[in-house]
Amino acid sequence: MHNENPRIRLDDAVRYFDTKANLARELGINPQAITNWGDYLPELRVYKLMQRHPQAAKVLIKQAVSNG
């Protein structure tokens, strides 16, 4: 078992919520902010998603781990 912080791939999260706009709405942020992210959600956004949508976060974290 490793001690890394949970990670969620941006592409997986967008696919889960259908659009970047929907993802932004679920996180309570401006959709424009997402364009500044890299391949992964920022750590604080992962934790916010874990609070607001724990089941979605669990699925997305598992996908990120299994996809490397």
Image: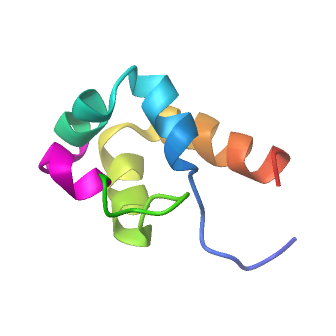
Please tell me whether the stretch drawn in magenta is mainly helix, strand or loop. helix
The residue most toward the top is: 18
Looking at the image, residue 18 sits to the left or right of residue 1; the answer is left
Q: Does residue 55 lie above or below 4 as drawn?
A: above
User: Residue 2 vs residue 55: left or right?
Assistant: right
Q: How many marks?
A: 0
Q: Quadrant of the C terminus?
A: bottom right
Image quadrant where residue 41 sits: bottom left
| Residue in the image at 17% along x and 36% along y | 25
Quarter of the image where one finds residue 11: top right
Q: Residue furthest right?
A: 1
Location of residue 17 in the rendering, given as x and y in whole percent from the top left corner:
39, 25
Q: Which residues are magenta?
A: 27-34
Q: In the shown orientation, is residue 23 left or right of residue 43?
A: left
Q: Is residue 68 above or below residue 1?
A: above
The location of residue 3, given as percent across then percent down, is: 73, 79
The verdict on residue 28 being magenta is yes
Depicted 65 relative to depicted 24: above or below: below
- Is residue 58 magenta-colored? no
In the rendered view, tell whether residue 39 sits above or below residue 66: below
Q: Residue at x 48, y 63 (%)?
A: 38
The residue sitting at the bottom extreme is 3
Quarter holding the N terminus?
A: bottom right
Instruction: Give the residue at x 70% y 49%.
Output: 64
Q: How is the image coloured?
A: rainbow
